[in-house]
Amino acid sequence: MSPAAVTAVVLAYIALLFLIAWLSGRHADNAGFFTGNRRSSWFVTALSMITAAMSGVTYLSVPGSVAADSFSYMQMVLGFTVGQLVVAFLLVPLFYRMRVISLYQYLDHRFGVTAQRTGAWFFFLSKMLGAALRLYIVCAVMQLLVFDRVGLPFAANAVVTVLFVWLYTRRGGVKSLIWTDAFKTLCLVASLVLTILALVRGLGLTTGEALREVAASEYARIFFFDDPSSERYFWKMFVAGIVLLVAMTGLDQEMMQRNLSCRTPRDAQKNIVLTALCQIAVILLFLTLGALLYLYMARVGMPLPPKSDQVFSQVAVNGGLPLYVGLLFVLGMMASTYSSAGSSLTALTTSFTVDLLDATRRCDEAQLTRTRRRVHALMALGLTLLVLLFGRFGNDSVINLFFKVAGYTYGPILGMFLFGICTRRRIDGRWLPLVAVAAPLLSALLQYAAGELFGYRIGFELLLYNALLTMGGMWLLGRKKRIQS
């Protein structure tokens, strides 16, 4: 696949993206940027949520993980589904009732401005690292496909990628994202389905025969109940899925910014339930694709790449399949990447402007617009620098690294919200930042000690331990006076 073909697909995709962004966001004001003026269609929002939840990490890493983990990821997806219901019927009514722009305004209402800023800073760290990791893995693939072949360095790759994201989200924010991400979802699902069909033909099978071969293979095992110390143990992954979804969707400004753009709480709930059902189907497509990739490589005698993240790209580009498969791979990768990066950049801008600068209360409309645009540019610069940093030093499996980062940084956020929702206790907020920093450090120590002393491997459920430690610290900060009913 030539660099010219890849570049043509990327430029055509970006041109359509900019057209949709311009049409949907050309009259957007600050309210349109932050909340979509709360007029988004629930059905279109649900479509936009699918690519936002998947990201480029999912697109590249989940198919490659099938060799080591089979279909065990579906155990976590089942937990995600339960978590979506918690978000829809517990958190959505709360946030709509308070009319929040940023979720962390709830922490201000409950515990004071120090709590709001603590939550916002942890979100800032989480989202910056997560968004940069997602961008990095796709930039690494584009470096191999295009930039290395034309003699351009990784730095140029990173700058160009973030520049496009900054440009198409600069004006419309959430108002544009809802429509551009719905378009990206269609591109992502189409690329998955058509690639699966191409692999089936490449194997010389009918669709039914291919599905039966996948089901009979070693890759298709979903449930793991035999070893409680394993990271793939069902109850660990199921509970971790619930907690991760609540923390990384329900308490994440990026994801909830879309849900809160719907007209009513009822519309937001319909959107979330539909998203949960679609997520099950799309993840199954990813895992089926992964099994077919490994079956195809075994059939044609292709060597396995050094990293599982590279399996999809290796087969799509160098696997002897028709040219359009490689172009579909690029299209799906771009769809997932630009979705997660665009929404992350918008959410970071919103939280920094609202929570940390308090600009919505201190500035008039014109000043708020100037502040928002400056913050938006600053966040884009920060993402670029982090992508370059990961490009220089990144050497871990990206999906595991992403969840490790989330397990440490989302834990204090989850703990603060759970403490606020599940108790009626006030706290001395001056010491809350210390608790929020101590909890991840203690959870890291707990993870190490459990492995060294007892041979128990704490996996994705680390987030829950982190949140519980945060809640314990907040209880110690509690005051005798309680909130009135």
Image (spheres, grey):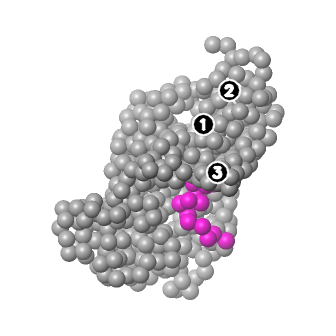
Q: 208 left or right of 472?
A: left
Task: Name the residue beneath numbered marker 3.
Answer: 454
Circles 3 and 2: CB distance less than 8 Å? no
Residue 103's tag is: 1
Is 15 drawn above or below residue 182 in the view shown?
below
- Disc 1 on helix, strand or loop? loop
Residue 341 visible in this rendered orientation of the protein: yes
Dividing the image into 4 quarters, which one contains the C terminus?
Answer: top right
Tell me the quarter of the picture where residue 140 sits: bottom right
Residue 126 visible in this rendered orientation of the protein: no
Estimate the x, y position of residue 360 in percent, counting from the top left: 67, 37
Task: Name the residue beneath numbered marker 2.
Answer: 110
Is 59 drawn above or below residue 263 in the view shown?
below
- Disc 3 on helix, strand or loop? helix
Instruction: Give the crowd class for mark 3: few <14, some 14-19, many >=20 residues within 10 Å.
Output: few
Q: 148 left or right of 443?
A: left
Dividing the image into 4 quarters, which one contains the N terminus?
Answer: bottom left
Estimate the x, y position of residue 407 in percent, counting from the top left: 61, 49
Task: Quote the CA–CA distance across marks 1 and 3.
Answer: 39 Å
Estimate the x, y position of residue 79 in percent, counting from the top left: 45, 42
Estimate the x, y position of residue 317 in percent, counting from the top left: 39, 78
Residue at image location 25% in from the left, 76% down from the top: 202
- For the record, the magenta segment spans 393-407
Between discs 2 and 1, the one toward the N terminus: 1
